[in-house]
Image (cartoon, rainbow, N blue to C red):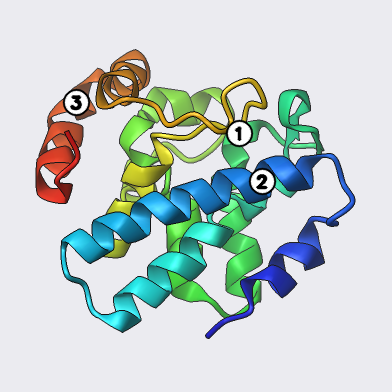
Amino acid sequence: MLDYFSIIHRYLAPDSTAYPLYLIHCTLVTKLALEIAERLELDAAAQRLIEEAAMLHDIGIVRTQMPVIFCDGALPYLYHLTEGCKLLEAEGLPKHARVAQTHSGIVLTAERLRSVGLMADLIHFIPRSLEEKIINFADLFYSKDSATLWRERSVVEARNSIEKFAPANLALFDEWAATFGVN
């Protein structure tokens, strides 16, 4: 099994202010993703990938500017997708890198990508594998904001978030909720 903590610690110091937010968020996302994987009776290899990739999905935040979660990098927050992908590809983890790049795909639009200077080709940001979809979905239920860090959003709250950013993807969210047994 991959030692994802050694990778996390390579990029995010355990004594940093951002570390506890990262760790709590990723742990909660991982827990929900694994509950979904078990409900779907995925095999051990798929569950292992989900655990590892969910714990690493937000590693790109270290290169972004987001004061509310104590990130003081140079890039806009949305770049945590592409930067996380780059970091995990450099670690030799292409499947984990895909999760990092696609984990916000359900709330993206071409206009939103263009607004921060990212490529407008959404195909690179849309989850394809079942593992990518599960982690993407689980991530919608947890924030890294310290005020709501521990609280799981309801399906209605997660749905409202998608409606705010990408209303065209509501049908996909509803399909995933039904497939994953989350009401």
Judging by the rendered image, the residue that carries numbered circle 2 is 22
Residue type at mark 3?
Answer: Leu
Residue type at mark 2?
Answer: Tyr
Disc 1 to disc 3, C-alpha distance: 22 Å
**Residue 14 in the image: above or below residue 17:** below
Mark 1, mark 3: which one is toward the viewer?
Answer: 1
The answer to which of marks 3 and 2 sits earlier in the sequence is 2
Residue type at mark 1?
Answer: Lys
Disc 2 to disc 1, C-alpha distance: 7 Å
Judging by the rendered image, the residue that carries numbered circle 1 is 144
In the rendering, at what x and y percent does residue 148 appear?
57, 24
Quick check: can you spot residue 128? no
Report helix, strand or loop for mark 2.
helix
Q: Which of 79 and 182 is in front in this view?
A: 182
Q: Which residue is at a point 83% across and 56% down the rendered structure image? A: 14
Give the number of marks: 3
The answer to which of marks 1 and 3 sits earlier in the sequence is 1
Q: Nearer the viewer, residue 183 or 12?
A: 183
Residue 14 as seen in the image, left or right of residue 98: right
In the rendering, at what x and y percent does residue 59 appear?
64, 54
Label 3 Cα crowd, 10 Å radius (few <14 / some 14-19 / many 20+): some
In the figure, residue 172 lies in which quadrant? top left
Disc 3 to disc 2, C-alpha distance: 27 Å
Label 2 Cα crowd, 10 Å radius (few <14 / some 14-19 / many 20+): many
Q: Which residue is at a point 41% across and 73% down the rendered structure image? A: 49
Marks 2 and 1 close (CB-CB < 8 Å): yes
Marks 3 and 2 close (CB-CB < 8 Å): no
Judging by the rendered image, the residue that carries numbered circle 3 is 170
Report helix, strand or loop for mark 3.
helix
In the rendering, at what x and y percent does residue 173 appear?
20, 34
Residue 169 as seen in the image, left or right of residue 127: left
